[in-house]
Amino acid sequence: VSFLDKMDLKKVETNKDKRYLEQKEIDILLNQLDHNIRYRNLIEFLINTGLRISECLALTFDDVEGDILNINKSLNRNRKIDSTKNDSSHRRISLNKKCLEIIESQRTINNNLSLTLSKFNNKENIIFFNTAGSYWIKENLSRYLREHTTVKFTLHMLRHTHASLCIDKGIDVE
């Protein structure tokens, strides 16, 4: 008998058909992230924009022009900036009031951390930054969300959630 046969493996139930969050799940998720505004801001921004997580983590304050967001890069696994998934992924999107509030919140957090933490240095001008002022590691972000929330989801599901919310409101998906 191998040691694997002796191990008590966890059963993980997943619903393969479920690709987006319901409004109730969104509310629970955001409520559970109230204790950490940077994570809440990121999740709420993803839900409101439908961006890929790699696109969102690569955003800088320079990508914002009024209420327009320029999406022209993504963050790869090595925390380096790459082009977007494909040429058609380069786009400009309108930001709603909530997204503009989140960007201002992130700017305020950035300024406060710059004044209070000596190790904080957001020299890249990143909107969604880690506590050192650099790019988040997607896997660390996912782990934190798994450990601090009860809603089962993937970051990519938030893209589908955005599309679902748009359809529910009668907005053309294109």
Image (tube, helix red, strand yellow):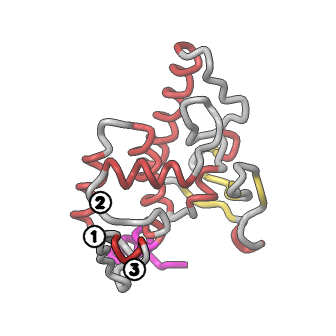
Question: Rounded to the nearest whole Å, what is the CA distance between mark 3 and mark 1?
Answer: 45 Å
Residue 66 is left or right of residue 2, and the answer is: right
Farthest bottom residue?
Answer: 17
Residue under pointer 3: 1
Location of residue 140 with respect to 122 vertically, above or below: below
Q: Earlier in the sequence, mark 2 or mark 3?
A: 3
Marking on residue 26: 2
The local secondary structure at tag 3 comes to loop
Is 9 inside the magenta-drawn segment?
no
The local secondary structure at tag 2 comes to helix
Question: Rounded to the nearest whole Å, what is the CA distance between mark 1 and mark 2?
Answer: 6 Å
| Crowd rating for badge 3 (residues with CA inside 10 Å; few <14, some 14–19, many 20+) | few
What amino acid type should be assigned to the residue bearing mark 3? Answer: Val
Residue in the image at 21% along x and 63% along y: 24
Residue 72 is left or right of residue 148, and the answer is: right
Q: Which residues fall within the magenta stretch? A: 160-174
Between 156 and 95, the one lying in front of the other is 156
Residue in the image at 60% along x and 50% along y: 57
Residue under pointer 1: 22
Q: How many marks?
A: 3
What amino acid type should be assigned to the residue bearing mark 1? Answer: Glu
Is 166 inside the magenta-drawn segment?
yes
| Crowd rating for badge 1 (residues with CA inside 10 Å; few <14, some 14–19, many 20+) | few
Residue 63 position, x and y percent, is 68, 46
Q: Earlier in the sequence, mark 3 or mark 1?
A: 3
Q: Quadrant of the N terminus?
A: bottom left
Residue 26 position, x and y percent, is 29, 60
Residue in the image at 43% along x and 44% along y: 39
The residue mark sitting in front, 2 or 3, is 3
Location of residue 36 with respect to 5 vertically, above or below: above
Q: Are marks 3 and 1 in contact (CB under 8 Å)?
A: no
Residue in the image at 65% along x and 36% along y: 134
